[in-house]
Amino acid sequence: MAEGSVPVATVTGEDLSGLERNVLTTTVERMLAWARSSSVWPVQFGLACCAIEMIATTTSKFDIARFGMEAFRASPRQSDLMIVAGRVSQKMAPVLRHIYDQMLEPKWVLSMGDCASCGGVYNNYALVQGVDKIVPVDVYVAGCPPRPEALLYGLMKLQEKIRERARAGGGR
Amino acid sequence: MRVTLTPVQEFLAERLGDGALEAHAFRGDATVVVARERVVEVLQAVRDEPWRFEVLLDLTAWDRYPAEPRFEVVYHLLSLPRGERLRIKTRVPGEDPVLPSAVPVFAGANWFEREVWDLFGIRFQGHPNLVRILMPDDWEGHPLRRDYPLTEEPVEFRGHVPKVPSQIIPHAPPRRDP
Amino acid sequence: MEQSQGPRQMESLQDRGRDLAGGLARETLTINMGPQHPATHGVLRLVLELEGEVIVSCQPVIGYLHTGIEKEMEYRTYHQNIALVDRIEYLSSYHEELAYCMAVEKLLGVEVPKRAQYIRVILCELNRIASHLVWLGTTGIDLNVSSLLMYCFRDRERILEMSEMVSGQRMMPGYFRIGGVAADLPDEFFPAVRQFLEEFPRRLDEYEAMLTDNLVWRRRHEGIAVLSREDALRYGVTGPTLRGSGVAYDVRKAFPYSSYEDFEFDVPTGENGDAFDRYRVRMEEMRQARRIVLQALDRLPDGPVLVEDRKVALPPRGELVRSMEAVIHHFKLVSEGIHPPKGEVYAAVESPRGEKGYYIVSDGSNRPVRVRVRAPSFSNLQALPAMVRGGMLADVVVAIASIDIVLGDVDR
């Protein structure tokens, strides 16, 4: 036996009382939710000005890596989250839907900024008035552009949402 | 009252002949207005020595609807050796919005003319590839024309008559001088 | 040091390949790059035809960010449009606002107070530094120098903090007004700027030490994406892309605006028109921008920051309590807006990407008839096919990064 290691019998005790302190019980959904929420990988989908604040969120002052989200994947097949950062034009809308369809379940969408949430400052022929007309959105982050702290708050809300669904027994 | 012309405006006035050219310099911007058939000739003339307006800064248009001729196509040129800018304008009627392309004179006119075609519906004869550039390829209509609606979504919330944003501060026509 | 293989050497390899293949016909491979792509700096789509790794032709497809801003501006008053123009070239919003406000001021014929002009210069030059830092950081991350992104954005955060002190917003400030600026600079701004500008040259030296003599950086930039002087002028390219090709055209020197003639600064140019020269030009521009800000801070005159003409600019709040006329002016300006005379103007500034011009046509009413944004990135991007033809696929990334386009500017 290696130095310092303790046999299981002594950990749990003869009457298994130590089990409470040393063993966690949970549901499979909650464990999966904990894993999923702690390493959400966004797909690089920066469209306009909000993308600059999104890049600023990944840099050292705001540090999205604390939440496990620094791995922005170029390919939608490898990512969980689509942060729609910026205005969606008529030409870009089918591309956005295509990228969303290529993502694998479970997937989430965070609509960053006013243009993605509701059309923002613009209300005209060229823009889709809110990306929720094309894809289902989980979290809306308001702002033009939202501060990096606001985006981080939105991401934290998303993490809560992922965990809440599991606690409530939902699917994803 | 004869307005003082800059040297290049005088040169163009002489070259094109009497009455073929309007010139002004509102707020210091030297401007000439020519007929659409002579635009390419004018562009070539100012691009050559000694004027050397070699840089096409901008090629755009605007819609004067309902005034006729409906469209005004505007070229902004820059001469580096002279440190001068020049604006050349031409008018194009609404039923027949065609004029010769400036691509043989300035290669940079390519995308500008595509944009004017896309947003205004003005055709440029002799353009190598006159297709839409900003709108989707199957878009119908030319958005920047004044009779094309802005296509606003009314902003709705409870207890409020839906209004479109551009009507919240209405259009106020030019005031008469007091 | 071996020079990187330029287009000429690639052609001889192609010839050898042709000989080896015994003169057989070959097809080119068409590849689509974008619009969702990590290295296109936005939603740009390139349709590339490749023969092996060598680019035969490149066709940019734009319009994925077309926002209809020019049409939208025809339905808003002149003052409301300031909020819209911020978002066109979103990395250099101050320049955008300055160009728009200058065009409207030219149309109206109002003179901006000297203090406001100096404040505008200070903020625009700080914005130039911030924009060039984004360029450097994103170029770095495209070429896998990921720490460069962190360093550059760290410095950019300092400038965004200063922007927040002045206007309340990090990006999209909405700070300039027709006739001046919205409010005076706060007291905490001055020590913050001086502190930043004192530390900044050392940071730039660090970046240059890391990059300029770096073998990998040079091999990927020297001789790559060459834009000749003739091509640059033909396509109407302006800004550092033009200056890298040897043409010393800078709007601040050629058509000085907003008191730039009071300041001493150099305009760096390159010789070869390759990506490395454009890199050198932008690094030097950051130093010159710092020089301008220091001069402007030292000589900042006193006085009002907004023109006193009540038909153009809002009266100060204090006056509204005392004067009925001020209330009426305020009401008229907010509910209707200004009425510039009938006419048209063109005004331009030197944005970090080139000549940003505004062509405004007015018919005397409270809304512009046409606002045309002369976007530097639109013309600069037109030169991209000329730059990448004959180069390799990996050089397209360097080419796009070295032009420094902003897609919001290209598509408006």
Image: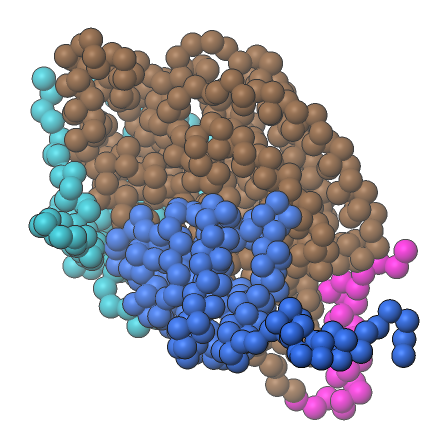
Displayed quadrant of residue C8 = bottom right
Which residue is rendered at x = 22% and y = 44% of the image? C75
User: Residue B101's spot in the image, x, y percent?
Assistant: 37, 57
Q: Is residue C361 magenta?
A: no
> Can residue B129 be seen in the rendering of this structure?
no
Q: Nearer the viewer, residue C23 or C215?
A: C215
Report x, y in % for residue C109.
Answer: 31, 21
Question: Residue at the front extreme?
Answer: A15
Say which residue appears at 74% left-offset and 74% top-offset.
A11
The colour of chain C is brown
Residue B147 visible within the image = yes
- Looking at the rendered image, the quarter that the C terminus of chain A falls into is bottom left
Q: Tell me: residue B111, above or below residue C199.
A: below
Which quadrant is the N terminus of chain A positioned in?
bottom right
* Residue at image point 76% right, 91% down: C22
Q: Which chain is blue?
A: A
| Image coordinates for residue C93, horizontal then vertical, percent | 46, 39
Q: Does the magenta stretch include residue C7?
A: yes
At 57% from the left and 20% from the top, the residue drawn is C190
Among the chains pictured, the one given cyan colouring is B
Q: Give the range drawn in magenta.
A: C1-25
Task: Give left or right: position of C139 versus C341.
Answer: right
Residue A59, relative to residue C26: is it above or below? Answer: above
Tell which of C267 and C189 is nearer to you: C189
Pinpoint residue B34: horizontal percent, then vertical percent: 29, 42
Q: Nearer the viewer, residue B54 or C194?
A: C194
Q: How many marks?
A: 0
